[in-house]
């Protein structure tokens, strides 16, 4: 006898006794939160770039240290934004598939 994925999901129960299948129906998307988090990521890119520019102008001898630190921070923020791009590929960013 084969067990299908939907049958498994219907039988998974949390510690409160709520089935996964029922819990999933209770979830509602919070699009404003998603867009605010995405905007925060883009804001941090601007802040990191400005901070690196100011440090480079103020302390030009620190350009290697400034470059390394800002590159690490930019990589982290870009990976953060990439998670949103991944979700957008699954149409989870907007209630409308056009955006």
Image (cartoon, grey):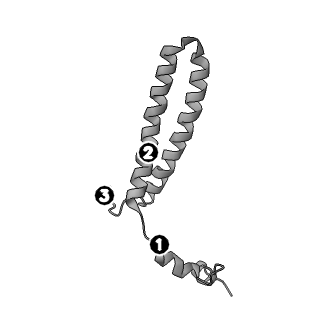
10 Å crowding of disc 2: few (<14), some (14-19), many (20+): some
For this rendering, which residue is in front, 47 or 28? Answer: 47
Mark 3–mark 2 Cα distance, whole angstroms, equals 23 Å
* Mark closest to the chain's N terminus, 1 or 2: 1
Which residue has dot 3 on it?
98
Which residue has dot 2 on it?
40
Q: Is residue 10 left or right of residue 86?
A: right
Residue 64 versus residue 46 in the image, above or below: above
User: Which residue is drawn at the image coordinates 47% and 56% (left, top)?
Assistant: 87
**Circle 2 SS class:** helix
User: Which residue is drawn at the image coordinates 48% and 15% (left, top)?
Assistant: 57
User: Which residue is drawn at the image coordinates 56% and 35% (left, top)?
Assistant: 73
**Circle 3 SS class:** loop
Mark 3–mark 1 Cα distance, whole angstroms, equals 22 Å
User: Which residue is drawn at the image coordinates 45% and 27% (left, top)?
Assistant: 50
Which residue has dot 1 on it?
27
Residue 82 versus residue 51 in the image, above or below: below
Mark 3–mark 1 CB contact (< 8 Å): no
Pair 1/2: label in front: 2
Q: Position of residue 19 (x, y in %)?
A: 58, 82
Quadrant location of residue 95? bottom left
């Amino acid at each position: 006898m084969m067990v299908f994925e939907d049958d498994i999901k219907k039988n998974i129960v949390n510690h409160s006794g709520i089935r996964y299948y029922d819990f999933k129906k209770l979830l509602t998307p919070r699009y404003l939160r998603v867009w605010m988090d995405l905007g925060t990521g883009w804001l941090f890119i601007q802040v990191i770039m400005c901070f690196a520019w100011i440090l480079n102008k103020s302390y030009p001898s620190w350009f290697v240290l400034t470059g390394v630190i800002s590159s690490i921070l930019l990589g982290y923020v870009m990976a953060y934004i990439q998670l949103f791009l991944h979700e957008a590929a699954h149409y989870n960013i907007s209630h409308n598939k056009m955006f």
